[in-house]
């Protein structure tokens, strides 16, 4: 809501705030009406005044420059000017020394070709007034002011620019503050200043004709509807004061009739509408729902198709307006209009909001109606509008005022005790403070004992329960009075969320393993990510139909909720590589989203990505597998495998991508990027990662670790070489060694792998390194030799 | 052999041995000396063997002399041995030098994302006051996200939060408040919970992210006031931004609280003196709060006459931006290594 201080002065004395608007702004903000911006035009035009050229001479050294004596009221200044459009006696706009014109142009004493100049005669553009309200818009030369301009007066005042405007962020509950009157009431309460009562002039001319009648079919959506006719109006431009008022709050002047309705809306908060009587068929205005499928063309020419749920204002044949939202092209006021029907009504907020949202039309009117207007002030606003129309457009007001108001609004009465206010606010508010809050807000209240019975003003329809009154007391006494007290309550033990505990541990472990944490959006960005996610869905047990789609995304390629983090990690790798991070470790703990029949499923997942500038994809995968293994071990999960899987998606490397299984459950995927994908992005293909389902992974966590007694006898290392198939299974070798050595085997590592040379194709020479230890003795050399022999025999049989 | 001769021989042998020990440069050559004179086949053994030539009664006396000398030499050898070893170790130590000025790294530690870091910090502060974490889904019913939180359908308050819709009945949660609903409906009172998590608004620019994070708190008990709210938030802000940070409440509006307030704290960057970040006001807006609206309690099956609540919420990105001095909200989701490795 844009507030003009000048306009506000119509309702309450705020003359002292023109110089210090921040005092008013801060007070409003403290009271819950946040002022987001304060604009003072007169501040910007300080030291710019009206002057008169008393003598026009030539610069002694330059033909094209004039040398003027300019009377600025209290003194006469010598000013050099380069323009040619001025003559002696002209009233001009003078930027005195000290003025700062738009563009941070500071006016200083200057010397031009040896002659001193004490200011500048300014043009419209120099003043930043290209589109200003000053009539003269000639851009060549300086601004020549009308003869009646007062010499010495601030230019801002002369041009009607001596206003301060406030951008007030009005919260949805304070619809009463969407007008100058509303904000004036607030100022009156906050500063204890009386409201100025406006006098409404009686129309100079009246008529006594049969009025168009009202047929209110839907009193639920429209509890009150009023109208009055004005005959013989002359539609034309509005007077300057009205134009300036509307422009000061950012509205365009249209014509005197429409401007009056807008003026009343911005002044009192009541939107109005004027219909051209000539285009109303029949003798009644009907307030009823639209007919399904009906067409309607709004004032701005937009063609709409109505669903039937919209409340319309109609005549016997057609819709004339969408109630409270927008008028129709068919019945708007035009230059040829002579008779008008002025509408003032109360529409139910939810109905107006629904129409406005479903058709996508937001107007100043719908904004106010959908937040709530003052039902009991409809008649006063109509009266003022008709009076102003008669005054400005010269018509005759019809004596008959028509109205449909079947059920007057029930009066709210709230009971509230002194103790309740104190308990809620948490400090000692006195009965006087409470009473004066109600009084200053204009709420009717009656106190009996410790309990008040309060009737809020009709425009404060947001006050419905005791707590609402507590807030009013709190904000007017001042939230600063609330002390800081920690609640002294008996401790009730609360279980910490196990996911939170586990995720925190996972994060710190992964940090320890050298991984930085990433947080991506929960929806994909771009067509590639979506395409890849569909492939991945297919590879898992889901299909494309399980993807979750946003109905109203920011843009069409930001509409898919992520079902796997892998596509985002791939794009992230590409981005990071291009930004110069050629090696990296990243992880994210996030959610995957699925639609399953009519409901939704979200899984917690962990995704990890690794890329290494100095390593091949195979080596990168080896690094990653080491991480994966350490990671699983930390969580006491020992039986896990990377199983080959068919139909690897084209995003992934067919040989280097596998399904991870742990303890018989499908946990996720370990993958390397397919080089055909990275080729398109012109980045290397050494990007690997894994993604696992954390809900499954954490199912039986934490697993208590149990102490196992350990041997005090020495451990002995023995190496064995064997010729094996290239894709040998370590598990098989391990089983063979274990079979022979039993409990003595502590570990078995692949120590060295050799191929080529004398090794036949398809075979490898692998050196395994075993650690052996007995629990009850030191192993003798003979025992070890025997063991080694047996193992070699086993491995030779491969 | 005569005893005198033996004595003489022992003396000669001893001086020889002592001379060689003294000239031994390292433990190896010292060992050689030991073998030559004192070993099993050494020169002293030979002398001892030669004693058998003496008359029986002279043997013990002569043997004693030889053995005494031998003991004396062994002792000397040991001390010499210790000296040599010490010198050798010293040499090794002397040779081991390093230039400590050269930068070296081991495997670098990873870092948490600033959102996790700030969220963890916020949670750990509030958990000291007894709050514990609850979670909920991103895709929420319209009912949990709006209706039960006192946002009726077609109420203008819904315009305060630009909502992503999945279908008629489901939205991407616009705040973590539906977790309050889930907890109130399912857990025993009194309770103190925190609801951290990802939330969604149809809005994107330098200061608005379509998918950002919140941490909300809810405390429901029998006597809850605005003063408690200010107490909890005042404590929280001091812990997070420093002991001298002040808190102020400004009246505001949220459908699910009444009274409602916006929370400002003295700008942690300029300590309230005024700077670019706080637009020279010295104050910075950090969140919203209020006493739980009775309609919310009622719609969650809680007796609003018996129980009251307070609730507060902060944006994690906003807190991280203030605490770490991050200027652009979009950095949080770009996940550049250069960014995420800094926290």
Image (spheres, coloured by chain):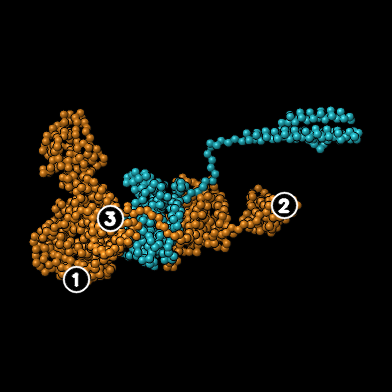
Query: In the rendered view, does A390 fall on the left or right side of B99?
Result: left
Q: Does residue A75 lie above or below A612 as drawn?
A: above
Badge 2 or badge 3: first in the primary sequence: 3
Q: Residue at x 16, y 57 (%)?
A: A197
Chain bearing mark 2:
A
Q: Which residue is mark 2?
A: A778
Q: Any idea which chain is the orange one in this picture? A: A
Rendered location of residue A539, percent (x, y): 50, 61
Query: In the rendered view, does A443 fall on the left or right side of A230?
Result: right
Q: Are marks 2 and 3 on the same chain?
A: yes
Q: Residues within 10 Å of mark 1 (few under 14, many from 20)?
A: some
Say which quarter of the image contains residue A124.
top left
Chain bearing mark 1:
A
Q: CA distance from mark 2 to mark 3?
A: 87 Å
Q: Residue at x 15, y 45 (%)?
A: A158
- Kind of element beneath mark 2: loop
Q: Residues within 10 Å of mark 3 (few under 14, many from 20)?
A: many
Cβ–Cβ below 8 Å for labels 2 and 1? Answer: no
Q: Which residue is mark 1?
A: A215
Rendered location of residue A112, percent (x, y): 21, 31
Which numbered disc covers residue A476? 3
Nearer to us in this view, A675 or B40: B40
Rendered location of residue A303, percent (x, y): 25, 63
Nearer to us in this view, A290 or A627: A627
- Kind of element beneath mark 1: strand
């Amino acid at each position: 809501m844009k507030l003009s201080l000048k306009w506000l002065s119509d309702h309450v004395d705020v003359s002292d705030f023109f110089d210090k608007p921040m005092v008013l702004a801060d007070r409003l903000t403290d009271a819950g009406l946040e002022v987001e911006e304060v604009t003072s035009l007169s501040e910007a035009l300080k030291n710019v005044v009206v002057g008169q050229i008393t003598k026009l001479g030539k610069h002694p050294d330059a033909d094209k420059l004039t040398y003027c004596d300019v009377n600025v009221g209290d003194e006469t200044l010598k000013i050099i000017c380069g323009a040619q459009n001025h003559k002696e006696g002209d009233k001009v706009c003078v930027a005195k020394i000290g003025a700062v014109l738009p563009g941070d142009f500071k006016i200083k004493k200057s010397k031009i070709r040896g002659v001193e100049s004490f200011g500048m005669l300014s043009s419209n553009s120099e003043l930043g007034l290209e589109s200003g309200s000053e009539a003269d818009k000639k851009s060549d030369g300086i601004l020549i002011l009308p003869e009646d301009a007062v010499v010495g007066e601030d230019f801002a005042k002369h041009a009607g620019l001596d206003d301060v405007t406030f951008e007030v962020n009005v919260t949805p509950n304070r619809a009463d503050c969407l007008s100058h009157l509303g904000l004036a009431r607030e100022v009156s309460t906050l500063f204890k200043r009386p409201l100025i009562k406006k006098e409404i002039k009686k129309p100079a001319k009246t008529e006594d004709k049969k009025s168009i009648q009202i047929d209110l079919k839907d009193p639920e959506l429209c509890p009150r509807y009023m109208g009055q006719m004005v005959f013989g109006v002359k539609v034309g431009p509005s007077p300057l004061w009205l134009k300036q008022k509307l422009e000061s709050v950012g509205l365009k002047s249209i014509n005197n009739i429409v401007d009056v309705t807008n003026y009343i809306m911005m002044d009192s908060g009541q939107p109005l509408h004027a219909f051209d009587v000539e285009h109303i068929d029949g003798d009644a205005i009907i307030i009823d729902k639209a007919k399904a499928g009906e067409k309607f063309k709004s004032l701005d020419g937009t063609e709409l198709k109505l669903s039937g749920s919209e409340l319309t204002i109609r005549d016997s044949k057609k819709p004339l307006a969408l109630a409270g939202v927008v008028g129709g092209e068919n019945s708007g006021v035009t230059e040829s209009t002579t008779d008008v029907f002025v509408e003032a009504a109360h529409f139910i907020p939810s109905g107006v909001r629904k129409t406005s949202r479903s058709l996508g039309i937001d107007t100043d009117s719908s904004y106010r109606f959908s937040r709530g207007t003052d039902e009991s002030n409809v008649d006063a606003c109509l009266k003022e509008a008709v009076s102003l129309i008669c005054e400005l457009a010269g018509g005759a007001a019809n004596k008959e005022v028509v109205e449909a108001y079947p059920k007057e609004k029930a009066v709210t009465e709230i009971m509230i005790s002194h103790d309740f206010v104190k308990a809620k606010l948490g400090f000692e508010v006195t009965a006087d403070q409470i009473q004066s809050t109600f009084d200053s807000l204009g709420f009717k209240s009656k106190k009996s004992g410790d309990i008040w019975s309060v009737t809020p003003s009709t425009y404060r329809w947001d006050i419905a329960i005791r707590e609402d009154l507590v807030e009013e007391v709190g904000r007017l006494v001042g939230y600063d009075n609330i002390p800081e007290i920690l609640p002294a309550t008996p401790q009730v033990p609360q279980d910490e969320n196990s996911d939170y505990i586990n995720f925190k541990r996972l994060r710190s472990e992964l940090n320890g393993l050298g991984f930085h944490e990433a947080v991506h959006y929960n929806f994909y960005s771009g067509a590639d990510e979506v395409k890849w996610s569909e492939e991945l869905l297919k590879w898992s047990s889901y299909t494309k139909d399980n993807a979750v789609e946003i109905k109203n995304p920011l843009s069409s390629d930001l509409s898919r909720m992520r079902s796997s983090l892998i596509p985002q990690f791939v794009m992230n790798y590409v981005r990071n590589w291009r930004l110069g991070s050629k090696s990296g470790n990243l992880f994210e703990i996030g959610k995957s989203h699925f639609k399953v029949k009519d409901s939704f499923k979200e899984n917690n997942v962990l995704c990890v990505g690794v890329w290494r500038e100095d390593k091949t994809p195979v080596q990168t995968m080896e690094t990653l597998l080491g991480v994966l293994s350490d990671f699983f071990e930390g969580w006491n999960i020992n039986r896990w495998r990377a199983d080959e899987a068919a139909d690897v998606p084209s995003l992934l490397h067919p040989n280097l991508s596998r399904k991870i299984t742990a303890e018989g459950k499908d946990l996720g995927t370990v993958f390397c990027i397919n080089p055909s994908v990275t080729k398109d992005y012109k980045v290397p293909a050494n990007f690997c990662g894994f993604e696992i389902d954390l809900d499954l992974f954490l199912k039986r966590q934490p697993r208590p670790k149990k102490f196992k007694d350990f041997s005090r006898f020495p451990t002995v290392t023995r190496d064995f070489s064997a010729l094996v198939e290239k894709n040998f299974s370590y598990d098989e070798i391990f089983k063979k060694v274990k079979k022979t050595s039993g409990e003595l085997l502590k570990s078995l590592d692949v120590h060295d792998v050799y191929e080529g040379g004398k090794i036949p194709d398809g075979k490898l020479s692998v050196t395994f390194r075993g650690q052996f230890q007995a629990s009850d003795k030191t192993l003798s050399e003979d025992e070890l030799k025997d063991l080694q022999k047996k193992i070699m025999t086993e491995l030779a049989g491969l | 052999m005569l005893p005198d001769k033996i004595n003489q021989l022992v003396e000669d042998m001893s001086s020889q041995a002592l001379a060689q020990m003294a000239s031994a440069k390292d433990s190896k050559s010292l060992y050689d000396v030991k073998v030559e004179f004192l070993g099993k086949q050494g020169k002293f053994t030979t002398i001892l063997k030669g004693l058998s030539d003496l008359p029986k009664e002279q043997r013990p006396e002569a043997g004693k002399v030889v053995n005494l000398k031998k003991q004396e030499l062994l002792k000397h050898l040991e001390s010499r041995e210790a000296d040599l070893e010490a010198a050798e170790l010293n040499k090794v130590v002397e040779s081991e030098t390093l230039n400590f000025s050269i930068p070296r790294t081991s495997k670098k530690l990873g870092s948490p994302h600033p959102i996790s870091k700030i969220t963890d910090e916020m949670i750990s502060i509030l958990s000291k006051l007894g709050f514990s974490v609850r979670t909920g889904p991103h895709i929420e019913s319209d009912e949990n996200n709006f209706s039960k939180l006192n946002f009726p359908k077609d109420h203008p308050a819904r315009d305060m939060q630009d909502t992503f819709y999945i279908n008629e009945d489901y939205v991407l949660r616009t705040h973590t408040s539906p977790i309050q609903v889930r907890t109130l409906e399912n857990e025993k009172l009194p309770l103190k919970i925190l609801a951290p998590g990802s939330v969604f608004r149809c809005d994107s620019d330098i200061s608005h992210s379509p998918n950002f994070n919140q941490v909300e708190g809810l405390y429901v008990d029998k006597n809850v006031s605005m003063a408690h709210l200010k107490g909890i938030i005042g404590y929280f802000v001091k812990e997070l931004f420093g002991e001298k940070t002040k808190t102020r409440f400004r009246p505001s509006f949220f459908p699910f609280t009444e009274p409602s307030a916006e929370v400002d704290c003295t700008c942690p960057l300029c300590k309230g003196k005024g700077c670019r970040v706080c637009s020279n006001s010295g104050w910075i807006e950090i969140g919203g709060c209020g006493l739980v609206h009775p309609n919310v309690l009622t719609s969650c099956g809680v007796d609003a006459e018996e129980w009251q609540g307070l609730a507060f919420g902060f944006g994690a990105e906003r807190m991280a931006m203030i605490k770490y001095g991050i200027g652009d909200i979009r950095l949080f989701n770009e996940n550049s290594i250069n960014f995420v490795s800094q926290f």
